[in-house]
Amino acid sequence: MTLKQTLSLLAGLIVASPVALAEPEVPVNLPKFKEGQYVHHAPTVEDLKNDDSINPELKKVILKGRDMFMNTQQFRGKYVFNDLNCKSCHLGEGRMNWSAPIWPAATTLPDYRGKNHHVNSLEERIAGCFSFSMNGKPPAYGSDDMLAMVAYHQWLAKGAPVYEKNIGGRGFSHLGREAPEKLDFERGKAVYQENCAICHGENGQGQRKDGEVVFPPLWGDGSYNWGAGMTRVFTAASFIKNNMPLGKPGSLSDEEAWQVANFINSHERPQDPRYTGDVKETREKYMNFHKYTNYGTVVNGTLLGDHDNTGTKPFLKPDVLRPRTFE
Amino acid sequence: MNSFLHVTLAAVLAMAATSASAAESGNPDRGATLATQGDGSGAPCTACHGADGAGNNAGGFPRLAGLDADYLFKQMVDMNAGKRTSPVMQPNIDNFDEQQLRDLAAYYAGMPVPKTSTATSVDASVMAMGSKLVNEGDWDNYVPPCSTCHGPGNHGVGHVFPAIAGQHPNYIRSQLQAWQNNQRNNDPNQLMTAIAERLSQEQIDAVAAYLGSQNATNP
């Protein structure tokens, strides 16, 4: 073989198998699971189709729940009053580790939740994301729609141990609760413009096409309200670190994730449904939550959350948000 | 010549960076003339992309008609800057200045979208795999659905995310491979590199066939 032939053969090989040889240019950088953690592989729709142990009627209801989760906008004006779907924050159908997979709620609830100081059911947990994250009004407890949502959550948990709490990739908190850096609006804005504005828009308004939301808004009336978990800077920082920019998890540094999380949560959004009529008082009353948010604090000369704006939702608080006493 | 090209390119890039809209500043009538004349040294656009801008599958010539003007303009700038390599295409535009490229972009963007969807003879299972990737993704391999970025029906979103529904399968396949082979490095923030490099050859064939079979226009 001449040198020329060898070279062209080599060139051919390199072109033919670029993926096998090259390191990915944009690696999927997700955190490692910790020793001893339970790691779940939630089933897929394929699995559901092939699972003969599940009654066909139940399959239909699970798929209805899935459809509600993926396209929650079909209930715009009924259950949802912002531009989000459940999958906007729980990426990959709510199955994905590091994107707050939803199935742990089915294996760990009923349990006590610090957010409302009582024992919550799975329905109540789902109602929570409807009320805050979706700025909405949850389907009634026990209704067909609620049952479909519950069925979807529970099926995703298939095979997972009940009451196991040491779960790998659960929730949005792996960066911890305290920001390691000094958070600076301008620094966050720079990260935003460089990495996020291309999809979420210069003013966080998101982008629509043919009337459909393609890229969801990050603040303003179309976004989650001031009571949503995502308003906590640490929650948003962990979400962003492991899920954004879309398709590039783990590409931002921890510092960038914190800064941009603080930036998006330094803008106005619909009122916290727990609002007492006074923002300072509300912040005080729910300090265990709001100590992690910018609600009721002054940013760039404006007191955030000092308004009656509930977005397009014609009420403040859905009736289902109420205390339980078990007496 | 060399330094002239240099200066022109720098100017083009500077303009691109200020995101002046090609749709606003391009003249489609002048673009129409340029498309039939060519740049002097290369072939006229119509020779490959067709008089109606529909391109064709066999040659791997993309449909240009109805694509976003800023997107088209940026692609030509990127080709001249070497960020997107195409020995077949680039020689046809290397003598154009920035205004001429804007005129061409405006011309093609304003053309009616032809029916380009390519009938395929591939297996139903291949189509099913393509449909699943495009509409539901392959999250276990961190591939979001194509429509998350390319929009409802994959008809494109804004100036950044081009329409890919009804684009020719051979062209779609060649672009996904170009990203894998480092021939195309011009996507903003490597948003498309991330996706393309995670696809297997089988998946590339499947999405190309499926997208090619879709309607390029809204139903």
Image: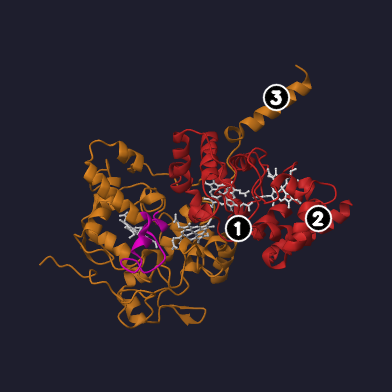
Task: State which quadrant residue A27 falls in.
Answer: top right
Give the residue at x 75% y 62%.
Answer: B29
Rounded to the nearest whole Å, what is the CA distance between mark 2 and mark 3? Answer: 37 Å
User: What residue would you read off at disc 3?
Assistant: A9
The kind of secondary structure element at disc 3 is helix
Q: Is residue B77 visible?
A: yes
Q: Which chain is red?
A: B
Choose mark 1 or mark 3, whichever is in front: 1
Subunit bearing disc 3 = A
Task: State which quadrant residue A184 falls in.
Answer: bottom right
- Residue A12 got which mark? none
Choose mark 1 or mark 2, whichever is in front: 2
Specify few, some or many for label 3: CA neighbours under 10 Å numbering under 14, 14-19, or 20 or more.
few
Specify few, some or many for label 2: CA neighbours under 10 Å numbering under 14, 14-19, or 20 or more.
some
Mark nearer the N terminus (1 vs 2): 2
Residue type highlighted by circle 3: Leu
User: What residue would you read off at disc 2?
Assistant: B96
Single out the residue that lies furthest toward the top: A1
Magenta stretch prevailing secondary structure? loop
Subunit bearing disc 1 = B
Give the residue at x 36% y 46%.
Answer: A168
User: What residue would you read off at disc 1?
Assistant: B160
- Residue range highlighted in magenta: A70-90
